Image (tube, rainbow, N blue to C red):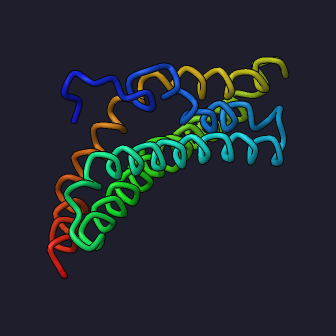
Amino acid sequence: MNDGVVDPFRDTPIRYLGYTNEIGEAFRHFLGHRLVLATYAVASAYASADAAYKGFEEYTHTRNEAEGGSPHLRRVSFVVLDTMLWQGLASVLIPGLAVNRVVWATSSLMTYVGPRLSNAYRAVGPTGAGLASIPFMIRPIDDAVTKGMDAYVRPTFSVWSQIN
């Protein structure tokens, strides 16, 4: 998808805003439910901004090709939908669930080993494990979501875009 053009939402540090909710999940024990939800709002706003950006790019590139507006607007709609689905899965849903489970598993392990550990370790250990897991999951999740969408979702979009 990258043909030498820098995508500000995927090729720059702005990409990390999509992982704000993972930070929230890692710190869930300290932040509380409302602040964790706020981190999801930031990640969702990032995903929405990327979809709007991609939709606007598609609109500006294809508006001169449109006859009657319908095919042009359909392509823009599919770009926005594709981006929202990709971002929702790759930036919000899957990594948030993964970090949540890493924190939960570490917390469970800390409880099992509990009597031998101080309360500070039992409190900070799961957060540290959650934070440490984030860099290792970014690329594999991005690649898996891209491959899954290329195999299942995007071919369906192609069929739908041909229907008049």
- Residue at screen point 44% across, 46% down: 87
- Residue at screen point 27% across, 63% down: 72
Of 93 and 97, the residue lying toward us: 93
Residue 100: percent from left, percent from top: 60, 42
Figure quadrant of the C terminus: bottom left
Whether residue 4 sits left or right of residue 120 in the image: it is left
The quadrant holding residue 26 is: top right
* Residue furthest bottom as drawn: 164
Residue 133: percent from left, percent from top: 51, 25
The quadrant holding residue 4 is: top left
The quadrant holding residue 117 is: top right
Whether residue 118 sits left or right of residue 156 in the image: it is right
- Residue 116 lies, with reference to residue 37, above or below; the image says above
- Residue 128 lies, with reference to residue 63, above or below; the image says above
Of 44 and 139, the residue lying toward us: 44
Figure quadrant of the N terminus: top left
- Residue at screen point 37% across, 63% down: 77
Of 155 and 64, the residue lying toward us: 64
Tell me how many marks there are.
Answer: 0
Whether residue 12 sits left or right of residue 139 in the image: it is right
Whether residue 32 sits left or right of residue 12 in the image: it is right
Residue 112: percent from left, percent from top: 68, 34
- Residue at screen point 58% across, 31% down: 17
